[in-house]
Image (cartoon, rainbow, N blue to C red):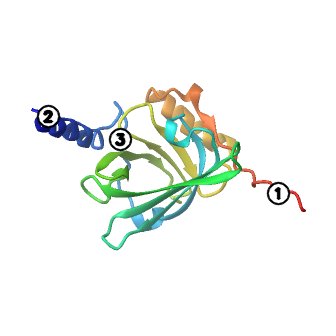
Amino acid sequence: MKQLLCLALLAGLAGCAGSLPPGAVPVENFNLDRYLGDWYEIARLDHSFERGLSRATANYSINKDGSVRVVNRGYQEDKKKWKEAVGKAKFVGDQSVGRLKVSFFGPFYGGYNIIDLDEAYSRVLICSNSTKYLWILAREPRLPDEVLTQLVEKARALNFPVDELIYVDQSPVPEPPAR
């Protein structure tokens, strides 16, 4: 009975990686090679694994097995140190669709759905499997106000709680005082 319950739980968690919030549609004609590299986190909805982090970034590269290596990094101001998480992402279906699943914890995957991406691959709107998770990333540490407003309004139209967005401090980390 215990094994059956564990299998049901794992099947349920695996299903979470494949779902999308109502109305959210992953981008088509996605090109992973253009997406790889460094991104700055501009805004996010709060969640435990990034709570309190500033200067958050993401780097995407290809693993030897063809999956995507994900390195998320952020600065913990209260501890004056960097925190890093390394994960793996895989496509859910066709690789020309911006719909992946990502794992930082072994076999447990969550949705990584690219729901808005400009032609230049300079800014992106990403959600998970529910409206509890949302990120706005850009190639530069800041976005023009009109672009940021456009992305926030798109998220609002999809019922994300955008009034709860955390706008990430991307200013340089102060140097320690000289001794």
Residue that badge 2 annotates: 2
* Mark 2 residue crowding within 10 angstroms, few (<14) / some (14–19) / many (20+): few
Label 3–label 1 contact, CB within 8 A: no
User: How far apart are the two marked residues, 3 and 1, measured between alpha carbons?
Assistant: 45 Å
From the viewer's perspective, is residue 27 above or below residue 69? above
* Tag in front: 2 or 1: 2
Count of marks placed on residues: 3
Identify residue type, mark 1.
Pro
Residue that badge 1 annotates: 176
From the viewer's perspective, is residue 51 above or below residue 28? above
Q: Is mark 3 on a helix, strand or loop?
A: loop
Q: 13 or 122: which is nearer to us?
A: 13
* Tag in front: 3 or 2: 2
- The quadrant holding residue 176 is bottom right
From the viewer's perspective, is residue 83 above or below residue 66? above
From the viewer's perspective, is residue 62 above or below residue 93? below
* Mark 1 residue crowding within 10 angstroms, few (<14) / some (14–19) / many (20+): few
Give the left or right position of residue 178, taking residue 40 as reference. Answer: right
Residue that badge 3 annotates: 25
